[in-house]
Image (cartoon, helix red, strand yellow):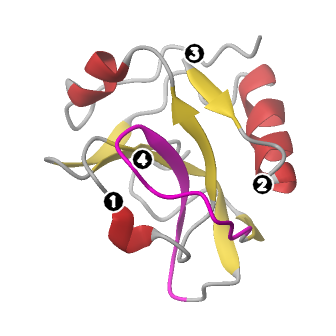
Amino acid sequence: MIQLRPDKAPGTVANFVKSARDCRYDGLVFHRVEANFVIQGGDPEGTGRGGGNQPTELSDLPFTKGSAGVARAGDIRVSNLMQFYLCIGSCRHLDGQYTNFGQVVAGQDVADAVKVGDKIRTIRIE
């Protein structure tokens, strides 16, 4: 379970919620797994190159284990619309560089066990 932070990243949370409710994540894979760092998924292409763009929303939230962030390429102002990552280790070097939009509050063990190619069954918004 991820506690979303619309107070820190309102546009990102709104886009994530809409994509989840529209079942856009269902069946997509985690294409990147870096031990003690991050698991990354949500790319409709499954390659790490797809997903569209949205503005980056930087905040004072630290990237600790369990933080939910948004992937981006070189331009700090532009983040990916679909791709997200969960920190499975301390990611403090990402502070102030990426959108942090939530925190795992239950089920970190599930995130810690993800392997490349594992599929997202569904993301339920409550």
Who's the residue at 74% across and 16% down the image?
A: 125
Residue type, numbered disc 3: Thr
Who's the residue at 48% across and 32% down the image?
A: 28
Q: CA distance from mark 1 to mark 3?
A: 25 Å
Check residue 9 in the rendering and tell me which mark sits there, or answer none: 2
* Closer-to-camera residue (122/46): 122
Q: Which residue is mark 1?
A: 91
Rendered position, 20 above or below 65: above
Q: CA distance from mark 3 to mark 2?
A: 22 Å
Does the magenta run of residues contain 61? yes
Q: CB under 8 Å between callouts 3 and 2?
A: no
Q: Quarter-wise, where is residue 124 in the image? A: top right
Q: Nearer the viewer, mark 3 or mark 2?
A: 2
Say which element carries label 4. Answer: loop
Closer to the chain start, of discs 4 and 2, is 2
Who's the residue at 56% across and 45% down the image?
A: 44
Check residue 79 in the rendering and tell me which mark sits there, or answer none: none
Residue type, numbered disc 1: Cys
Check residue 122 in the rendering and tell me which mark sits there, or answer none: 3
Give the farthest residue toward the bottom: 75
The span picked out in magenta is 57-74
Closer to the chain start, of discs 3 and 2, is 2
Q: Which residue is mark 4?
A: 46
Q: Nearer the viewer, mark 4 or mark 2?
A: 2
* Closer-to-camera residue (16/62): 62
Q: Nearer the viewer, mark 4 or mark 1?
A: 1
Closer to the chain start, of discs 1 and 2, is 2
Q: CA distance from mark 4 to mark 2?
A: 25 Å
